[in-house]
Image (cartoon, rainbow, N blue to C red):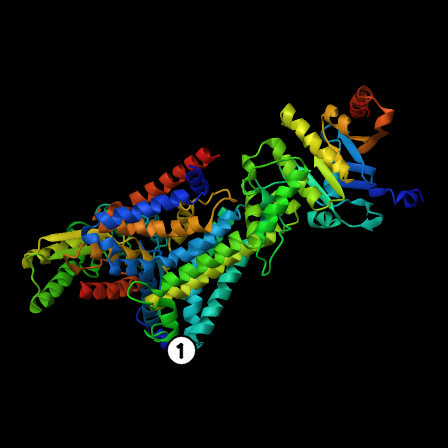
Amino acid sequence: MNQTRRFYSFRSSSTLVVFVTLVVVFSIFTPNHIFINERNIAALGKLFPDLGIIALGIGVLMICGEFDLSVGSVLPFCSFIFAQQMIADFSPFVSFFVSLLVGAILGLINGIITVKTKMPSFITTLGTLMFWRGILYVWSKMMPMSIRTFVPSGSPFQKLMAGNLNAYIPVQVIWFAIFAVILSILLHFHRFGNWIYSTGDNRDAAHAMGIRTDLVKIICFMIVGVLCGFSACMQSVRLGSFAATQGVGFEFKAISACVIGGTSLRGGIGSMTGIFLGALTIPIIDNGLILMRVPVFAISAFIGLATILFVLLNNYIERKTR
Amino acid sequence: MGSMAFAQGKPAEGLYFRLVTHGGDDPFWAVVQQGALDAANELGCKVDIDLAGSDLALQQKRLAEAVAQKPNGIALVINDDTAWDKPVEDALAAGIPVIGINNDDSKGPAGNKRLCYIGKSEERAGYMIGLKLFQTAKEKGIDFSKAHVAMPVEVPGANYGVIRSNGIKRAMAEFGITSSEIIDGGGLEMTTVEQRETSYLLAHPETTFSITNTDSPPISIPVGISLTAQLRSI
Amino acid sequence: MEYENRQNDDIVRMVNIEKWFGRVYALRGVDFHLKRGETVGLLGDNGAGKSTLIKILSGYHVADKGDIYFDGKKVVIRSPRDARRLGIETVYQEQALAPNLSISRNIFMGREPVKGFGIMDKKLMDEESMQALQNLGLRLRSPDLPVVTLSGGERQGVAIARAIHFKAKCVILDEPTVALSVKEVNEVLEFIREIQREGISSIFITHNLYHVYEIAERFVVMARGKKMTDVLKEDVTLDDLSELVIKSALVE
């Protein structure tokens, strides 16, 4: 009994229960159990980390009490920089680091604007979302750029960003797991994690206890920026090109992944396990329903419904355990 | 200067045109715009392009604004069978030549008074794609008796997609294929599209043909590649 | 100088503090001092200037004029960090704790002990938090409980335990008994006695004269940005004090 109570006192427990249920249901009820077929798992594992890695960062930022809607534009912006650097004859590795740096700078800009103007980040990053997309469209003329020749299939960088470990495990999953572990240590075991939670939960208290809350927020924005840069390179290498429509809609998908994972929209509440599961849950719902031959046009309705139900469930469990 | 003297001889010197499109956030229109600018440069005229982000009301406003500028001609994307009937008539009455590009009224000249239409017939495009694909498949000896055609669309409900899939269905009928499904590709973002279509193909192993209904090269290329790979393995 | 002589006695001495907020003259040359180990009740109506004075001491505001001496040395306090470094701890009703964080994470907020690479020493944090609470006479189930699950009195206990644990030299108690039940008020007053036993100086800001009269040794009454009265407990009765506060508010 005590164990059960303890289990439910973890906010991510509801996400875990639903996640396991989904996996079991889809494994049993998809025709020919195709859900757990190696091809399906490999396909899922190759694709979901594009958004998943960004969602991990968004989760940390949300715990800190802020949003970043600009990811939908920072991602293609970094992708454009990555492609452009390689076309300018820099090696893929150099271009990759430039892309991460640009991501960090765009995150820094989001952070500084939010902290200095004291405006809600929902507004400031909505602004930068549109601003960077506009700049990107003008600068790139929206023309796709092929980078296949710079990172041909089998080249070291291609293997690192879009290769396969074995038939089941594409390398993208490994990256997702690595980032989840790093951010988990940061959030739950590092003192900076305590500053993130305190800042998001009660900024005045954190400030009074001598935590530089503005700096903490700015760093969280930069973490999101760097992850966007990483995801941008990973996605472009897989696609073999830069495309101006990369990242469209990622901003709200990342937030719903975090919310499904039990992250509070008001900050201070959330866990890496929850965010990790949340980032997996949305693509699994999408994939599983299609595999169950649900008409594809209805998928959005299910994901919308799932998001609302998850929040209700989380709130319910929270009330029950307190 | 020399170039000035040379420019004197250009055929459309001093003329001004406008392209009123429904386009917006996708790279297809970047290509079209570049083409229009190149053409204008070559012919010595001026051209401006209007984008409306698939917002029909906004596109109508853009046309009205374009008419008010009194250009020497307007090229309009006629992506609706009724919404453009009166605006085009009004523009013509105001003495501004209007032609259709990219999409046309599904009834052609009978449905809209535009002077002419330049571009492919969507129905015919779908028909030709289907015809070519099925012909090739037939030569390779693929069995049509249980064939299923998947048609992912980038913008669900868009006029051109519906008309094009009608063409595909006409080609299917000629080959005796009866099973087909139009599916929501999930928009313009590639990872989403790829995820959707991969899942669909795994769930519907009976899929013999997949005809992605998009005009956006960066989507159709990677998705096409991955689909081919998937199809080969199934 | 008078200050020099008394320097050794005082932990805090604020001299001729002035503060403007735009066109509002919030503090009009206030002198305030706090002796070592002393508990001072800071009284006055809303807008009297007591929170402004305290916020200057805790680093939220910077005075436009005047000097602050802490532990005998002249200091400049520009931020809560500066104040905390000197040993000034604030126990605010709503601003001291992060409700969804655990007790131990709250007690060590911003001062987490680390094992290396910035990794927190969770075991040490848990043990020391429980010890600090026990010293106050508070027995709580687990250091992992979120603060929001505690009663109002227990929360004040956590904040006070934190101040004592980090050997604060001066604790600012801002309305610590507001919105608490009678039982919880007694609990909190007991915590404050523990602060006194530890020899820590404190400033007790409140509207409730009954609570503060029980515990403080000296009373400072403020009105309209000025210090009106500064009186030792042995020189006033509770009724005198009550009258002093009301009169101060009425004087033009």
Examine the rendering and report whether any part of residue C223 can be seen.
Answer: no
Question: What is the three-letter code of the residue carrying label 1?
Answer: Ser
Residue sitting at x 18%, y 66%: B232
Examine the rendering and report whether any part of residue B1 can be seen.
Answer: yes
Q: Is residue A60 left or right of residue B100?
A: right
Name the foreground residue: C68 vs B106. Answer: C68
Quadrant occupied by the N terminus of chain A: top left
Image x and y of residue C137, in percent? 66, 35
Q: Is residue C69 left or right of residue A59?
A: right
Image x and y of residue A2, in percent? 44, 38
Name the foreground residue: B87 vs A290. Answer: A290
- Residue farthest along the top direction in this orientation: C239
Asked which quadrant contains residue A84, the reply is: bottom left
The chain under label 1 reads: B
Residue sitting at x 68%, y 37%: C136
Residue under pointer 1: B3
